[in-house]
């Protein structure tokens, strides 16, 4: 019976599966991506080249990947979680060994003409492996020190590798993603409190290490922290990003300057306007009202995921969805907090909207996994 | 599956944790929404103002400076349109290397190269600095062709001030130079143009006094720029308003004649229209080349100029102060006549000296003039007569009369630092010298010596007032920006015409009586009779001892101790139109040195050409002819070209 079920799940008609597909979620994802294309068209000065057309192509590829992943049974992903994780770690090490230096950071791996960013891939693999781990782990063992050590180790390996690239922002994101899965799995609060205190300790040590022989962070990272604390101190150098981006928000106001009318972005005042700071263009041209609408999109996507996680009844699926949606939401909120000057500039792209191949494909892949969980878990809970 | 309770417990835990995560996300979302609202609504106004400044760059458009013309329309200060070579430090990279390459195309003299580099480094890195001016089209083309090898070098069309008559009108027209810090900080002049680097501003003369009118108004260009500072498009343009052209009362050719006639001796001269007060010529020797100030003196040239004896930069005719000497005697005479202390026919005996308070005051003629009345007192310039007059009327009346005739006043002219001169009073002497006023001081003042100081301009004004009986004031502007100056009607002097006629008669006698001190400088043209007054003002103090040992002849004295030679005159006697005043520093005798020059200037102004030989006394014609041939004039215009409004038809 189990075998039959497995067979039906593995080889059941795709049409049947599509009826179980969460089309609302997909529509939200596609709409948000479309907004991204609109923004990229604008930052290029009203041109599909160079970013918008490339983003559309990647979106279509991403959509294909999404469906492919979604129609693959969740069990398959559960079973291949560990190998995938190991592959992603291997890729990170490969970057460490032979990655091309881009902007002082080694983040890309050249595969022929493609440049892949393994740090984006590792996020998903980490969540897969953690969800798979906790799916097998009885609840009462979850908070035992030995069973704490294993997921922490699984998280710390990629965190440290990414941190060495150096990419502080992504490292923090990976650490928080791991923490989100562990939290959802029911790890005792005390551990989180302890880690929180430890983080504060580490942070102060890092700050104190500046200008000493054992300085931990790069100089530019210290400058970013410094200018975050007082962006006006250096409005033309390191604080430039934050200042110009805030000006764009203010310039947009409630109703915006109108599409393609944003002076800040059209006139090149905005740095990284097609990647990390793409939201400022939207803010300037469409104003607060549309910003809140976009915020709502992200909120709905996250809300759907949590609602599904609670209802699905499958521990692996629930943890996977919580983990993936948390990565998605963390990126989104970190990016907005960064561009609006709430946190230092850390180099986190805005998921679905920022220009960037690997990030976009990985986001679609993540939603593929979520949809997969949706199709297969709901199928199982019906029985 | 055998452990339903556990599964239920697991599900509950998961639900709790999921709801917590969801709650945390919602809180974050609201925080971000709140932040966006803060930036886009609360702070919007301030931040969008910053956005506006970000993209708009207002650049100034420099106006073309107004030109200066003489009364007949000859240009005295012009704008030469030319090409300039500029360098921008941040684009050049290695400034020295670029300049060395440039030097192969345009001559940049080696010692100036290091100065230039210093100057470039002193400016902010994006400010263009002029490397070379007056570049030829060929040079500009060469620079453009080599542009890739000359980063940061650009060419610009600009204008340079040019003074076609150079040193001849240097003091009148003045010159322009780059604006300096004190001028930028002048609270009364908040023109943004002053902050254009190296903006040319009037430094002396008309250029300085009329700077506001000549300068014009800045235009501006509002351009949209992107973050690199590159121009995207022009948003708005307000063209610069060019400066107003000036037409001054100076007659260029008369000025040229006067300069040539006076020659190299340190001197001040004013030729003025007696009725309108128009200054027709204003000469100050030594002089300098104002064009050198515009193109930039070399350090050596400038030091040379500062070292030149006789301060060539000072405008002597309006700023130079001299004891007026005997030219002041008309003032004393008028004061005496008006106060009734003397009858013009009263005869005073001059035995060569006048004793006051045990001190002897000498007449220039040691043996005395014998019986002297008012007319003879003027024509033969008897000092004793004026000692007596001064003693009778007192310093207050003398000062009062001097004031009414234009001494001790700063005449209003569009020239900087027009001298006030000095009319000493009793309280002034007590305050500055700490000594009581002596009767001797009054006597000295009576013959224009002692503390009294006056300028050539004031002598000319006095002469015009006496000649016309009107309160003539000097004027220099014919029109500003095409608007002619309103013709002025002078009030009559509050001096009885009877007295004025007596003085004029005395001045007539100076040149026309056989014993007159300037009889040699008379006119032979009955329609152009010249009247005037000589003056020989002492530079040295003649002590009793030198008196006793005998006054040495001028030729024996070193130059700086010799007397100043003065003469002021007007013509024609019966209907005066022109006045002239000349002071030759350390020139010696006024009658011998200054009077002939005044005669020539009056005649040149009257005839509008080289004075005809027939106007001179027959005996002098040969000498005059020789002198005229020796004059180095720009254009002798023998056919004549009468000065508008001066010469009679």
Image (cartoon, coloured by chain):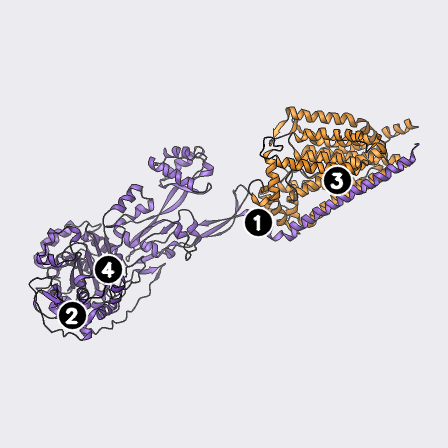
Chain colours: A orange, B purple
Which of the image's four quarters has the N terminus of chain B? top right
Residue B50: which numbered mark, if any? 1
Alpha-carbon span between mark 2 and mark 1: 79 Å
In three-dimensional space, the C-alpha distance between marks 1 and 3, rounded to whole angstroms, equals: 35 Å
- Chain letter of disc 3 in the image: A
Give the camera-side residue of B604 and B412.
B412
The residue to which callout 2 is attached is: B389
Which percent across, then down, holds residue B636? 19, 52
Q: Nearer the viewer, residue B255 or B233?
A: B255
Judge by depth and name the residue closer to the eye, B250 or B511: B511
> Do tag 4 and tag 2 residues touch (Cβ < 8 Å)?
no
**For the residues bearing labels 2 and 1, Cβ distance under 8 angstroms:** no
Residue for badge 4: B455
**Considering the numbered disc 3 on the image, is that residue within a helix, a strand or a loop?**
helix
Q: Nearer the N terminus, badge 4 or badge 2?
A: 2
Q: Please give the chain letter of the residue carrying mark 1.
A: B
Q: Circles 1 and 3: CB distance less than 8 Å?
A: no
Whole-number angstrom distance, CA of label 4 to CA of label 2 = 24 Å
The residue where tag 3 is placed is: A29
């Amino acid at each position: 019976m189990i075998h039959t079920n497995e067979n039906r799940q593995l080889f059941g008609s795709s049409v049947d599966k599509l009826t179980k597909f969460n089309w609302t979620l997909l529509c939200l994802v596609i709409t948000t991506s479309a907004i991204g294309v609109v923004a990229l068209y604008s930052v290029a000065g009203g041109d599909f080249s160079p970013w918008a057309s490339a983003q559309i192509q990647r979106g279509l590829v991403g959509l294909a990947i999404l469906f492919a992943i979604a129609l693959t049974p969740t069990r398959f992903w559960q079973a291949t979680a560990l190998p995938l994780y190991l592959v992603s770690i291997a890729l990170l090490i490969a970057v460490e060994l032979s990655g091309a230096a881009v902007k002082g950071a080694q983040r890309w791996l050249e595969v022929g003409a493609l440049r892949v960013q393994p740090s984006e891939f590792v996020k998903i693999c980490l969540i897969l492996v953690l969800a798979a781990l906790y799916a097998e782990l009885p609840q009462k063992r979850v908070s035992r020190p030995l069973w704490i050590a294993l997921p922490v180790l699984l998280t710390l390996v990629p965190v440290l590798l990414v941190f060495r690239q150096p990419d502080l922002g992504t490292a923090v994101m990976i650490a928080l993603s791991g923490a989100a899965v562990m939290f959802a799995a029911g790890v005792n609060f005390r551990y989180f409190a302890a880690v929180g205190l430890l983080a504060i300790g580490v942070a102060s040590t890092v700050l104190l290490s500046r200008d000493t022989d054992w300085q931990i962070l790069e100089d530019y990272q210290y400058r970013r922290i410094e200018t975050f604390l007082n962006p006006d101190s250096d409005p033309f150098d390191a604080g430039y990003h934050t200042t110009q981006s805030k000006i764009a928000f203010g310039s947009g106001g409630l109703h915006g300057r109108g599409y393609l009318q944003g002076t800040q972005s059209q006139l090149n005042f905005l740095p990284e306007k097609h990647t990390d700071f793409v939201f400022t263009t939207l803010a300037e041209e469409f104003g607060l009202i549309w910003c809140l609408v976009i915020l709502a999109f992200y909120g709905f996507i996250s809300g759907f995921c949590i609602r599904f996680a609670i209802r699905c009844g499958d521990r692996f699926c629930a943890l996977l969805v919580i983990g993936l949606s948390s990565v998605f939401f963390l990126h989104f909120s970190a990016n907005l907090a960064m561009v609006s000057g709430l946190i230092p500039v850390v180099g986190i792209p805005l998921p679905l909207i920022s220009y960037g191949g690997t990030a976009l494909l990985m986001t679609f892949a993540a939603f593929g996994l979520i949809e997969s969980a949706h199709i297969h878990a709901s199928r199982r809970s019906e029985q | 599956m055998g452990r339903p309770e556990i599964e239920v417990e697991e599900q509950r835990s998961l639900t709790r944790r999921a709801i917590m995560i969801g709650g945390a996300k919602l809180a974050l979302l609201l925080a971000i929404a709140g932040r966006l609202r803060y930036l886009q609504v609360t702070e919007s106004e301030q931040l969008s103002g910053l956005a506006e400044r970000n993209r708009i760059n207002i650049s100034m458009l420099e106006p073309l400076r107004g030109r200066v013309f003489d009364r007949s329309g000859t240009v005295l200060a012009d704008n030469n349109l030319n090409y300039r070579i500029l360098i921008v430090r941040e684009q050049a990279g290695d400034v020295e290397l670029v300049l060395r390459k440039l030097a192969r195309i345009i001559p940049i003299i080696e010692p100036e190269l290091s100065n230039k580099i210093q100057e470039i480094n002193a400016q902010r890195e994006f400010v263009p600095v002029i490397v070379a001016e007056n570049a030829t089209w060929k040079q500009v083309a060469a620079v453009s062709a080599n542009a890739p090898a000359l980063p940061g070098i650009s060419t610009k069309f600009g204008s340079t001030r040019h003074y076609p008559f150079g040193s001849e009108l240097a003091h009148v027209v003045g010159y322009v130079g780059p604006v300096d810090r004190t001028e930028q900080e002048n609270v009364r002049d908040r023109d943004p143009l002053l902050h254009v680097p190296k903006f040319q501003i009037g430094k002396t003369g008309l250029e300085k006094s009329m700077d506001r009118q000549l300068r014009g108004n800045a235009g501006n260009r509002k351009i949209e720029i992107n973050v690199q500072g590159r121009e995207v498009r022009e948003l708005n343009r307000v063209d610069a308003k060019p400066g107003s052209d000036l037409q001054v009362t100076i007659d260029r050719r008369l000025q040229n004649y006067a300069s040539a006639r006076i020659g190299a001796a340190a001197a001040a001269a004013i030729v003025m229209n007696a009725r309108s007060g128009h200054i027709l010529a204003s000469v100050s020797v030594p002089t300098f080349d104002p064009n050198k100030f515009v193109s930039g003196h070399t350090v050596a040239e400038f030091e040379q100029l500062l070292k030149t004896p006789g301060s060539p930069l000072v405008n002597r005719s309006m700023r130079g102060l001299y004891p007026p000497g005997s030219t002041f005697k008309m003032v004393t005479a008028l004061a005496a006549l008006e106060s009734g202390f003397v009858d013009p026919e009263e005869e005073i005996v001059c035995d060569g000296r006048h004793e006051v308070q045990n001190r002897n005051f000498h007449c220039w003629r040691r043996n005395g003039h014998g019986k002297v009345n008012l007319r003879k007192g003027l024509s033969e310039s008897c000092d004793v007569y004026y000692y007596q007059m001064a003693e009778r009327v007192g310093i207050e009346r003398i000062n009062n009369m001097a004031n009414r005739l234009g001494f001790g006043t700063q005449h209003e002219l569009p020239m900087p630092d027009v001298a006030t001169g000095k009319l000493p009073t009793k309280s002034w002497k007590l305050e500055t010298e700490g000594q009581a006023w002596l009767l001797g001081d009054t006597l000295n003042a009576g013959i224009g010596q002692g503390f009294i100081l006056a300028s050539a301009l004031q002598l000319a004004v006095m002469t015009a007032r006496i000649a016309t009986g009107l309160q003539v004031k000097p004027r220099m502007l014919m029109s500003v920006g095409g608007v002619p100056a309103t013709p002025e009607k002078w009030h009559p002097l509050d001096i009885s015409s009877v007295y004025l006629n007596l003085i004029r008669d005395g001045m007539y006698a100076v040149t026309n009586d056989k014993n007159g001190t300037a009889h040699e400088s008379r006119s032979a043209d009955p329609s152009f009779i010249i009247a005037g007054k000589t003056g020989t003002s002492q530079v040295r103090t003649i002590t009793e001892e030198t008196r006793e040992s005998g006054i040495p002849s001028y030729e024996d004295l070193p130059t700086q101790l010799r007397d100043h030679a003065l003469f002021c005159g007007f013509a024609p006697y019966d209907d005066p139109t022109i006045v002239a005043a000349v002071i030759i520093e350390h020139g010696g005798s006024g009658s011998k040195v200054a009077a002939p020059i005044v005669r020539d200037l009056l005649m040149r102004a009257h005839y509008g050409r080289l004075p005809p030989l027939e106007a001179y006394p027959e005996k002098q014609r040969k000498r005059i002819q020789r002198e005229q041939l020796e004059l180095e004039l720009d254009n002798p215009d023998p056919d004549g070209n009468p000065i508008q409004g001066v010469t009679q038809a």
